[in-house]
Image: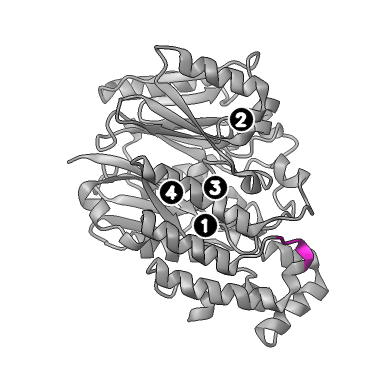
Amino acid sequence: MSGFEANFDGLVGLTHHYAGLSVGNKASIYNRDSVSNPRKAALQGLMKMKSLADVGFIQGVLPPQQRPNIPALRNLGFAGSDEQVLQKAAQYSPVLLSKLSSASSMWTANAATVSPSADSADQRVHFTVANLNNKLHRSLETETTAAALKATFANQNYFVHHHALPQHEDFGDEGAANHNRLCGDYHTPGVQVFVYGRSVLRGGPMPQLYPARQTREASEAVARLHQLNPAQTVFVQQKPVAIDSGVFHNDVIAVSNRNVLFHHQYAYLNQAQALAEIKEKMAVLGHDFVAIEVPSERVSIKDVVDSYLFNSQLLSKTDGKMMIVVPEECRQNAVVWDYLQSLIAQTSSPINEVCVFDLRESMRNGGGPACLRLRVVLNDAEFSAVNPATLMNTQLYDRLTKWIEQHYRDQLCSSDLADPQLLREFYTALDELTQILNLGSIYEFQR
């Protein structure tokens, strides 16, 4: 049975705005209070999905969440009609309203950790929704994320959905943004690499400026839930200095595909030891391991964070080589672009093509190509059980383009979030979207 990697990207929500909510994410903080363009943001993300689908990659869509989050505001004691709840919250604290209006679910790399059936003891695809408890605005995503994933991957013969880990900092879990899988062919057993920022029980080095969002204990819990073989599992700590430099997730400093790990010199603590363990465990499975390490003297961490070089996608092409999908910021950074050109020019490099996308609206909030996608490895039978309405094609692209152009505003700032009309616009838009993607009643306001 063959296997392949599908990427499910998050649609940008109608309340996409620059609130600077993510401490440790330099782009998010730097662009705080800028005026955003939700329509442009959604169309940019949609174009990436369609362009990759057009050249043969399996591409799916995950929906935005209900924002402003009226149910959460009600749980905080704001009462009355939805419009009254919105106005009272705005009067109480515009900052709180901004947090409960974040469109951050667009970055589906944080939606969940996914393990394919080839690695799980019960031979099913496992999903564990990330609790994202380091940030209030993200911790509120778990329920709707779980509902959306269950509506997309519904067949229990093939898919297992686990609850998010306990909402406590000891089990901070940021999902697939801190997870890589290395393998030969997608359908064969692979080595899963879990990256953490700190260990609660073991102690050890920690960043000093910014939070380490992922704990080792959370990663180990996910591995147990997914019934992974310890002989095919690696736990490695992210280098604290990288986190303090703005590398808030592993996918800002490393990316993998099949047997290739593309990473920076300062990606991991005790990096040589970590790479040796991965290589050894890959060898037991009969796979070669290719680590492409970018030296700091060639590309500094600052250039990494500014360009999001590693917040990219590595995709396997039919010629056996790989394409790297990067944001436009990589082309605008002379150091990074020079490195990429030299990389693809090497005859021995597994990467021989660079594909550039303009994702400026997402990038200004701190999310590049890899942030926008959730990788799901499937075999043919599993793929046939995926909700077909969520899979990108020309018809879906046309419907979503019209939907975005009809419902999205072309500019938004934090003060607009208190506008009751925006709330009504969102309800109308999401009600229509559930029909387009055949998602059922995943939103609170529909229940």
Residue 50's disc number? 4
Amino acid on which the number 2 mark rests in the picture:
Cys
Residue that appears at 64% across and 40% down: 212
Query: Crowding at label 2, few (<14), some or many (≥20) Cα neighbours within 10 Å?
Result: many
Report, in whole angstroms, how far the alpha carbon at label 4 lies from the one at label 1: 12 Å
Q: Which dot marks residue 330?
A: 2
Q: Is residue 119 above or below residue 270?
A: below
Q: Mark number for residue 174?
A: 3
Which region shows up in magenta?
Answer: 411-415
Q: Of the residues tagged 3 and 1, which is closer to the observer?
A: 1
Do the residues bearing badges 3 and 4 touch, measured as CB atoms within 8 Å?
no
Q: Nearer the viewer, mark 3 or mark 4?
A: 4
In the picture of the structure, the residue carrying the numbered disc 1 is 11
Please indicate whether residue 221 sits to the left or right of residue 254 in the image. Answer: left
Look at the numbered disc 2 and give the secondary structure of its residue. Answer: helix
Q: Residues within 10 Å of mark 1 (few under 14, many from 20)?
A: many
Amino acid type, callout 4 = Lys
Mark sitting earlier along the chain (3/1): 1
- Mark nearest the camera among 4 and 1 is 4
Q: Amino acid at mark 3?
A: Glu
